[in-house]
Image (tube, rainbow, N blue to C red):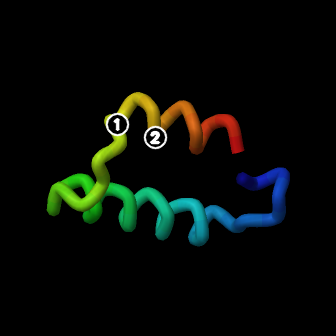
């Protein structure tokens, strides 16, 4: 994500948002799949 121009603050915001979605069962995709997708970006 850094290579695509996102700042550390942007990346932290994405992490917090995904954590909130997972905590509220709003993301049907498994954590490992999400992690792999995010690492790929």
* Residue tagged 2: 34
Q: Give residue 20's position: percent from left, percent from top.
A: 26, 64
Occupied quadrant, residue 17: bottom left
Residue most toward the left? 24
Compared with residue 17, is residue 28 higher up or lower down, i.e. above or below? Answer: above
Q: Which mark is residue 17?
A: none
The foreground one among 25 and 41 is 25
- Please give the residue where the numbered disc 1 appears in the rendered image: 31
Q: Position of residue 21 (x, y in %)?
A: 28, 62
Is 28 displayed left or right of 18 in the figure? left
User: Is residue 28 shown left or right of residue 24?
Assistant: right
Name which residue lies at 30% across and 54% down. Answer: 27
Kind of element beneath mark 1: helix
Residue under the image location 70 percent in, 67 percent down: 7
Name the foreground residue: 11 vs 29. Answer: 29
Q: Residue at x 48, y 69 (%)?
A: 13
* Residue 38 drawn at (x, y percent): 58, 44
Q: Secondary structure at mark 2?
A: helix
Q: Are marks 2 and 1 in contact (CB under 8 Å)?
A: yes
CA separation in Å, label 2 and label 1: 5 Å
């Amino acid at each position: 994500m850094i290579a695509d121009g996102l700042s550390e603050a942007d990346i932290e915001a994405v992490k917090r948002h995904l954590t909130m979605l997972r905590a509220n069962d709003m993301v049907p995709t498994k954590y490992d799949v999400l992690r792999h997708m995010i690492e790929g970006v």
